[in-house]
Amino acid sequence: MRIGMLTGGGDCPGLNAVIRAVVRKGVMHYGDEFVGFVEGWRGVIDDRTMALDLQTTSGILHRGGTILRSSRTNVKKIEGGFESCLKAITGHKLDALIAMGGDDTQSISVELVKRGVQCIGVPKTIDNDLSGTDVCFGFDTAVTIATEAVDRLHSTTEAHSRVQVVEVMGRDAGWIAVTAGIAGGADVILAPEKPIDMDEVVRLLRARWESGKRFALVVVAEGAKLPQTGQVALGAKVDSFGHARLSGIGQALAEEIERRTGYETRSVNLGHTQRGGTPTAYDRMLATRYGTAAIDLVHQGKTGRLVVLQGNRITDIPLEDAIAKTRTVGEDLFAVIKGLQPKA
Ligand code: F6P
């Protein structure tokens, strides 16, 4: 078969591991040929491609980023966008298309399936908020980076008797904040799922000081909301899917904490460092399992399906189910956080 591949949306550690797994199994077990579209859906619209074979996908398993590069191109917003995609797909005589991406990327695949393209999706987002799968690759790497940052910040925060706010990624769901916060032993953990209660934040920090520990770590997801400001973004600019550039909740929170408590407070935004660099062994393994499952689905003649991890089993679900709603952090994990904090 001839199969197209692309990576869309924010990059994610493990994308190269998926690409490598798809190509290796495809070439060596099915005799497939591949066409790589560069820069996500932009490359399909403009028909810009690169060769994907055993040679070009060798030595990339441990590399972050994506050899296909990525973009946040919304085909729905581009006049004649779907027609251009179909022209490129038929021009290359493709039998199927594998798109690695989050809900935005997969929403385009859903449209192409309606237009007769065999599309298979691979779930990708460090935010870990795609429905239907227990884990997206890249999440483990992001959490590992964020946890190491929290660990490192402990000593300098203690040395200066400060509050240190750490802003992590997580637009609509606080998976990174909650996981890295718990793993890093943060005193306060704030996620988009629950509006920030400043009185409670102050109570927890005061309790910490009164316990004799005169320093504290606060982990906040970029998408968390302060009652007075809501989400904090950099300017009014939105991307083609309508998402604002979230950033700054950490600083806003730090200022509010210092104002209310008088404790010297600093903030650091981990930003894109969480998405950069080499994927963890867990993410390489998960990405590889997703990749081999995706190429199998293509050959089983399935379309409009997303490979997912449920428990420890790789299976597949309709793409529509994955994009229908955001998978947010459950009450069980918020209860873990509460259980580790002083009672009100
Ligand atoms: O991929 C999701 C995400 O990591 C969000 O947490 C974050 O808001 C966004 O990407 C930032 O992406 P960029 O600045 O690269 O467009």
Image (cartoon, rainbow, N blue to C red):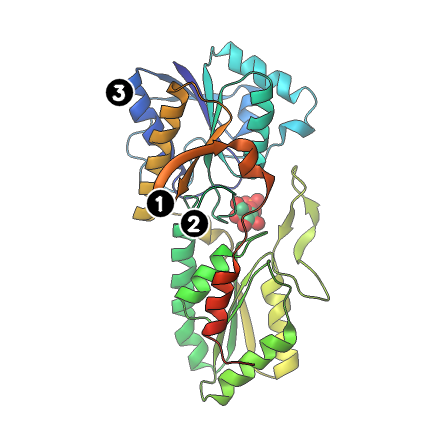
The disc labelled 1 sits on which kind of residue?
Answer: Asp
Inspect the image, locate mark 3, and give the three-letter code of the amino acid beneath it. Met
**Label 3 beta carbon within 8 A of ligand 1:** no
Mark earlier in primary sequence (1, 3) = 3
Q: Quadrant of residue 144?
A: bottom left
Query: Is the residue under label 1 in contact with that under label 2 (CB below 8 Å)?
Result: yes
Element under label 2? helix
Judge from the rendering whether residue 313 lies leftward or rightward of residue 244; answer left or right: left
N-term mark: 2 or 1: 2
- For the residues labelled 1 and 3, the Cα–Cα distance comes to 23 Å
Query: What residue appears at the point 35 percent right and 40 percent down from the top-left corner?
Result: 313
Ligand 1 contact, mark 1 (Cβ < 8 Å): no
Ligand 1 under 8 Å from disc 2 Cβ? no
The residue at which mark 2 appears reads as: 139
Which quadrant of the structure image shows residue 301? top left
Q: Are marks 1 and 3 in contact (CB under 8 Å)?
A: no
CA separation, marks 3 and 2?
29 Å
Q: Exactly how many numbered labels are in the figure? A: 3
Give percent across and percent down for residue 160.
46, 81
Q: CA distance from mark 2 to mark 1?
A: 8 Å
> Dot 1: what SS?
helix
> Crowdedness of circle 1 by 10 Å Cα count: few (<14), some, many (20+)?
many
Q: Earlier in the sequence, mark 3 or mark 2?
A: 3
Q: Quadrant of the C terminus?
A: bottom right
Label 3 Cα neighbours within 10 Å, binned few <14 / some 14-19 / many ≥20: few
Foreground pick, 78 / 189: 189
Residue 105: image tag: none
As drawn, is 81 to the left or to the right of 53? right
Q: Indicate which disc residue 283 carries.
A: 1
Residue that numbered label 3 is attached to: 28
